[in-house]
Image (cartoon, grey):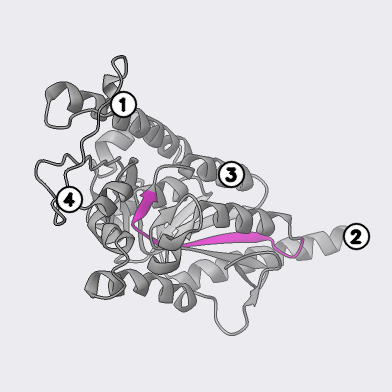
């Protein structure tokens, strides 16, 4: 277990588990190889997901564009609390950027609706509920739709569930509701022959719980369950359903695809990105006509 992996997994994650070793590879500054190439593919998708040649960059935003009165905010790759080396190397998204761009879209008088264009495996728990709350509040002011082009998994689905509506491509994935933590325990020297031994103070045994013991595992699970409880509650509120239904029908930690996700109540419509965007643009034009008539 590398120290880079220990750094990456030092906090709980609402992310598809397969992404944790990939992020550890990036943290190790191994800038070549299939894992890094796969991660960088997410960054390229930012531009592939734009609304086309007529879209203009939204003033004051990092990556949001406007097309026909609709702000298009891509949420792609793993999600981190702040921009850092990891976001630069993996094509990731930062919560700081999301807050900034979403606020810019809400404040811009030329924006009548907001489209969250999603293809993310999720990310670090830190800051996710805060941005989901911001989306829920913003959706009361301007129509906000989350459109899933690839996946809105874990933390990504946490965010999407706060929107007014979730639309999904036929083969797109939503779900992976739950929280994961990889807690390393070094049992032999590393490649340099070093062994890291941590000693905690007498009254803080839970500062470094031992995942190989029942008590240690219990402490870790208790933290994950507390976060998951908030996650599930927020999804239930956003999707206007019960906590029991989310637990029973929303994948139980797995994902659902397209029509199955709609049938379960995890999304509202199966349709293309173009159809979703065109519908929002039509809504914005109608709003403008009504506003003109009242003048």
| Quadrant hosting residue 195 | top left
Q: Give SS at disc 1.
A: helix
* Residue 295 badge: 2
- Looking at marks 3 and 1 on the same chain, the residue that comes earlier in the sequence is marked by 3
Residue denoted by label 3: 134
Q: Give SS at disc 2.
A: loop
Does 120 lie within the magenta span? yes
Residue at the far front in the pictured view: 193
Between 186 and 274, the one nearer to me in the picture:
186
Q: Is residue 219 visible?
A: yes
Between 252 and 284, the one nearer to me in the picture:
252
169 w.r.t. 225: above or below: below
Prevailing secondary structure of the magenta residues: strand
User: In this rendering, would 190 be left or right of 279?
Assistant: left
- Looking at marks 1 and 2 on the same chain, the residue that comes earlier in the sequence is marked by 1
The residue carrying pointer 4 sits among few (fewer than 14), some (14 to 19) or many (20 or more) residues within 10 Å by Cα, namely few
Q: Give SS at disc 3.
A: helix
Q: Is residue 118 visible?
A: no
The residue carrying pointer 1 sits among few (fewer than 14), some (14 to 19) or many (20 or more) residues within 10 Å by Cα, namely few
């Amino acid at each position: 277990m590398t120290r880079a992996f220990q750094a990456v997994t030092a906090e709980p994650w609402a992310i598809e588990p397969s992404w944790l070793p990939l992020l550890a590879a990036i943290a190790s500054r191994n800038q070549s190889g299939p894992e890094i190439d796969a991660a960088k593919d997410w960054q390229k998708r930012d531009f592939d997901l734009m609304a086309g040649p007529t879209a203009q960059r939204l003033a004051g935003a990092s990556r949001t564009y406007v097309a026909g009165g609709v702000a298009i905010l891509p949420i792609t790759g793993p999600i981190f609390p702040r921009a850092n080396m990891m976001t630069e190397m993996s094509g990731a998204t930062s919560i700081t950027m999301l807050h900034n761009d979403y606020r810019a879209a809400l404040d811009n008088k030329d924006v009548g609706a907001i489209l969250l264009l999603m293809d993310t495996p999720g990310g670090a728990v830190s800051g996710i509920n805060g941005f989901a709350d911001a989306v829920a509040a913003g959706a009361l002011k301007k129509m906000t739709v989350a459109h899933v082009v690839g996946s809105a998994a874990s933390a990504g689905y946490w965010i999407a569930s706060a929107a007014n509506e979730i639309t999904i491509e036929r083969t797109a994935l939503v779900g992976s509701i739950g929280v994961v933590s990889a807690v390393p325990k070094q049992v032999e020297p590393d490649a340099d022959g070093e062994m890291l031994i941590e000693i905690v103070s007498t009254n803080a045994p839970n500062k470094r719980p031992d995942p190989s013991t029942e008590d240690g595992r219990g402490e870790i699970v208790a933290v994950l369950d507390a976060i998951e409880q908030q996650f599930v509650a927020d999804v239930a509120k956003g999707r206007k359903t019960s906590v029991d239904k989310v637990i029973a029908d929303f994948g139980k930690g797995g994902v659902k695809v397209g029509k199955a996700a709609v049938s379960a109540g995890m999304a509202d419509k199966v349709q293309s990105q173009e159809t979703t965007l065109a519908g929002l643009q039509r809504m914005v034009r109608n709003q403008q006509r009504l506003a003109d008539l009242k003048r």
